[in-house]
Image (cartoon, rainbow, N blue to C red):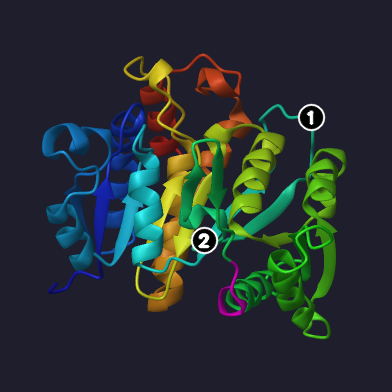
Amino acid sequence: MGDLTFRIALLRGDGIGPEIVEASLPIISKLNHDYSLGLEFVDVDAGDGALRRYGDPLPQHTMTELEKADVILKGPVGETAKDVIVPLRQHYDMYANVRPAFTIPGLKSKFEGVDLVIVRENTEDLYRGVEQLVTDDVAVGLKIISRRASERIVNFAKTIALTRRKKVTCVHKANVMKITDGLFAAACRSLKGSGVEMEEMYVDAAAANLVRRPQAFDVIVTTNVYGDILSDEASQIAGSLGIAPSANLGERKSLFEPVHGAAFDIAGRGIANPTAFLLSVVMMFEHLGTISSNKNFVAAANSLRAAVLKVYSSGRNLTPDVGGSASLKEMAGDIYQSLV
C-alpha cells in the first residue's frame, strides 16, 4: 500500500445509497486531505445492481476486492440486503454490531438527553438462517447461542461502558427460553464486580422502558434478533432512522453502514438524508484511530461529528425527514462548509 494507511472498500448500495455516497465523498475527501489520513477508496459492487449484472448480489470478484481492503464502508442495500450483509458478517466474523442512539441538538424529538449504545451479538441467533420446512405446514428455525460468542460480546460491551457511564443492561428472555437465553444471561452475570454496574432486563420490558425513559440506558448488550429490533426502536426515539449509524466490528475486518434501508420511494429525488452515512464514517475514523493509534483519525472524526451537529443546531439545510426542506446536496454542502 505504499504510504497509504488504510484501503477502504466502498459499496455504494442501492436506492438512495449511491446518492448519499456521492454527496458525502467531497466531505470525506476533504477530511482525508486536511488530516493526512492517507486513505484509498476502492469502489466495490454488491447488492441489487450486482444481482442484475452478475446474477449474484455478492459476486466473487467483489469478495476478492474485499479481501484486499482493510475496512468496508457501505451504503444501504435494497432487496438483497440479507444476501450481502449477513454473509459478510459471518464470513469475517464481525461479531459486534454497535449502534449508538443519541439526541441531536436542533432535531425535534419527543425525548431529550438520550445517549445510549446498543451492542448486539452479530453472528448467531435466528439470523444464522438455519431453518427449514418440516412439513408443508410447519417451519422450524434454530436459535443458536454459544458461550464463546456470548462472553465475547458481553466483554466487548463492558469495554465500551468503561469509556462511558459504566452501566450495562443485559437484555434477554431467559424466563421463557431458559437454555438459549439462559446461556446468554449467564455470560452477562460475569460482569458483576468487574467495574461496571450490570442490570438484567427482559426484552419486552426493555422495549417498553426505551419509550418510557430512554435516558436511563447507557450500554445495552443483547442477542442478534433482539438487538436488531431494539436498535431500530432506539434510533426512532433519538429522532429518525435517517440519523442512525452502525459498525460491524471484527478482529479481521470491520464494516460501517447506516442503519436505514435503500428507501426506493425517495430514490432519485435528491432529498435523502446523509447523516447516518456520515456518522458511520465518524465511527470508521474512530475505529481506524483505535487500531492505528493515529490521533489524526480521532481529530477527523471529531471534526465531522461537529460539522453535522452544527448544521442541525442551525436548523438550516435539513432534509424533509428531519423537518426541513433542503435537498441532499444542500445539506451535504452545509456540512462540508462547517468542517474545521
Q: Position of residue 287 (x, y in %)?
A: 45, 66
Q: Which image quarter: residue 295? A: bottom left
Q: Position of residue 120 (x, y in %)?
A: 60, 59
Q: Which residues are magenta?
A: 145-149
Callout 1: 10 Å neighbours few (<14), some, many (20+)? Answer: few
- Quarter of the N terminus within the rendering: bottom left
Residue 101 lies left or right of residue 135; in this view the side is right
Residue 298 lies left or right of residue 74; in this view the side is right
Q: Position of residue 276 (x, y in %)?
A: 49, 40
In terms of depth relative to the viewer, which is nearer, 337 or 114? 114
Q: Position of residue 127 (x, y in %)?
A: 51, 53
Q: Which mark is residue 287?
A: none
Amino acid type for the residue under numbered disc 2: Asn
Main SS of the magenta segment?
helix
Residue sitting at x 12%, y 34%:
53
Q: Which residue is mark 1?
A: 110
Does residue 322 lie above or below 82 as drawn? above
Q: Which mark is residue 122?
A: 2
Q: Residue furthest front?
A: 135
In terms of depth relative to the viewer, which is nearer, 31 or 281? 281
Does residue 118 lie above or below 238 as drawn? below
Q: Looking at the image, do the residues carrying marks 1 and 2 touch, with CB atoms under 8 Å apart?
A: no
Q: Secondary structure at mark 1?
A: loop
- Can residue 19 be seen? yes
In terms of depth relative to the viewer, which is nearer, 105 or 134? 134
First of labels 1, 2 by sequence position: 1
Amino acid type for the residue under numbered disc 1: Lys
